Amino acid sequence: MAETGIRFMTFGISPYCEKARWALDWHRIRYREIGWPPGLHQILAKRCGAKTSALPILLEGTTVIQGSSAIIDWAERRAEDHARSLAPSNSAGETQEIERRSNEITAVHVRRLAFAEMLPNYAHFGKPGMFERASGWHRLAGHIMWPVAERIMMRGYDRGPGAAAESRAKIDAELDWLDAKLADGRAYLAGERFSRADLTVASVLAAFARPKEMPTFHNMRAPEALAADVRRWSERPTLRWVLETYRTHRRQAN
């Protein structure tokens, strides 16, 4: 969605950016999305007054909203149709715990696993997703800075021996926890309607569920080890639930 007054800065492959993007679309808030290539994003974030270089960042005039959860909170306040609120209808404590675990455990290990498998030999596989929606001089500068950004990413993430195996085990454990919640046939993870808990979990696991409504991952190559993870987890109840949640709730016209 496009609007000159609200700018939304993202990495295309970031689950945190997808989480915020989904909330903005869900509330039909018009914005202009701008992709910031890695490396260059550190300079641009500082220039716009953000406290850190972490994305997503939303700019409304001189107001800076940084982080997916903060952007969801902002979108909730701006929403015109309160019947579409992402706040839980009940089970607020359960919703908070699901969102916390998704942000602090699942998303962290999804990213760590991806980087552990990609950065040593396949960093170029992630480049299309990282440059998605970047244009003009941003794209040019991003390509020029790519060798430096690649080295920074290589240094900045734990890719040591056992990192991938540890992250796989952490993701498996979280999938066990989520599978148990879904075992009673519920449509939503907490409460009786779609909430930020569902949006968060689905966004975080989209890289492995590969919903068609999130084409970014279909336009990227993946190392065989990650492709094997996609195949291995595809029959998990939670991954099937992610696909259904995207199909039912992700389209902007919903």
Image (cartoon, rainbow, N blue to C red):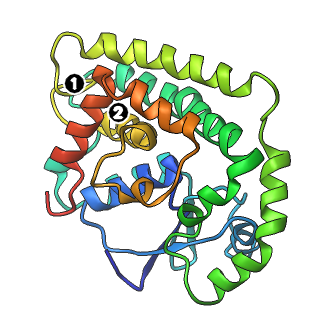
Query: Could you tell which of marks 2 and 1 lies nearer the N-terminus?
Result: 1
Q: Residue furthest front?
A: 224
Q: Nearer the viewer, residue 81 or 185?
A: 185
Total count of labels: 2
Q: Which residue is mark 1?
A: 191
At label 1, counting other C-alpha atoms closer than 10 Å, the crowd grade (few under 14, some 14-19, many 20 or more) is some
Which quadrant holds the C terminus? bottom left
Vertical order, 186 against 140 (above or below): above
Asked which secondary structure carries label 2, the reply is helix
Vertical order, 132 against 170 (above or below): below
Q: Does residue 124 appear in the picture of this structure?
A: yes
- In the image, taking residue 95 as reference, residue 164 lies left or right, namely right
Looking at the rendered structure, which numbered label has been put on residue 197? 2
Looking at the rendered structure, which numbered label has been put on residue 230? none
Asked which secondary structure carries label 1, the reply is loop
* Amino acid at the residue labelled 2: Ala
Q: Nearer the viewer, residue 226 or 188?
A: 226
- In the image, taking residue 57 as reference, residue 174 lies left or right, namely left
Residue name at image x 73 percent, y 57 percent:
52
> Residue 163, position in %: x, y?
73, 26
Which quadrant holds the N terminus? bottom left
Q: CA distance from mark 2 to mark 1?
A: 10 Å
Q: Does residue 75 appear in the picture of this structure?
A: no
- In the image, taking residue 88 as reference, residue 171 lies left or right, namely right
Q: Quadrant of residue 166?
A: top right
- In the image, taking residue 55 as reference, residue 251 lies left or right, namely left
* Amino acid at the residue labelled 1: Gly
